[in-house]
Every structure is written in C-alpha cells, then in structure tokens.
Amino acid sequence: MYEHEFVRVDLSMFGGKPKESYHDIIKEYEKDGWELVQIFAPGTAAYGSAAYFEIILKRRVE
C-alpha cells in the first residue's frame, strides 16, 4: 500500500516559470522516502496554459 503527496507549484504569469525550484522540492521529499510519480499541469489559465503544476509523489506505507 502507498500514501501519496501532492505539492502545488505556482507558475509566474509571464513566462510560466515555476516560482519555486521543483528540483529542490523533489530532492527534499526523496530524503524522506518519497518517489516521484508524475508532474501534472492542468490547463487552467488564459489560453489553456497552466497557472500551476502539481508534483505527485508516493511512498510505501509500512
């Protein structure tokens, strides 16, 4: 069985760049046993572009 964590990372309005380093977020979670499953970016902003993305992580429940 697994537990999942969803981390939202907002994107800047101009250029769509992440406001936080997603590399650093993933590395920090990996230290606690989390594994990256997917990065999901829903089209929710103007013209169908993403306003944020979610980092989806999982780890085994003991």
Image (tube, rainbow, N blue to C red):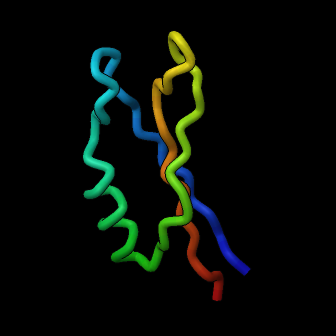
The image quarter in which residue 42 lies: top right
Residue 48 at x, y percent in the picture:
56, 18
Q: Reply above or below: 9 against 33.
A: above
Figure quadrant of the N terminus: bottom right
Q: Reply above or below: 56 against 54.
A: below
Instruction: Give the residue displayed 48% in from the left and 66% down from the top.
Output: 36
Residue 49 at x, y percent in the picture:
50, 22
**Residue farthest toward the front in the current orientation of the protein:** 47
Horizontal relation, residue 7 to residue 60: left or right: left
**Residue farthest toward the right in the current orientation of the protein:** 1
Q: Reply above or below: 26 against 40.
A: below
Figure quadrant of the C terminus: bottom right
Q: Reply above or below: 4 against 8.
A: below
Horizontal relation, residue 46 to residue 18: left or right: right
**Residue farthest toward the top in the current orientation of the protein:** 46
Instruction: Give the residue displayed 31% in from the left and 35% down from the top.
Output: 18
Residue 43 at x, y percent in the picture:
58, 26
Disc tally is 0
Instruction: Give the residue displayed 29% in from the left and 15% down from the top.
Output: 14
Horizontal relation, residue 57 to residue 60: left or right: left
Residue in front for this viewpoint, 11 or 28: 11
The image quarter in which residue 38 lies: bottom right
Instruction: Give the residue displayed 46% in from the left and 31% down from the top.
Output: 52
Residue 55 at x, y percent in the picture:
49, 52
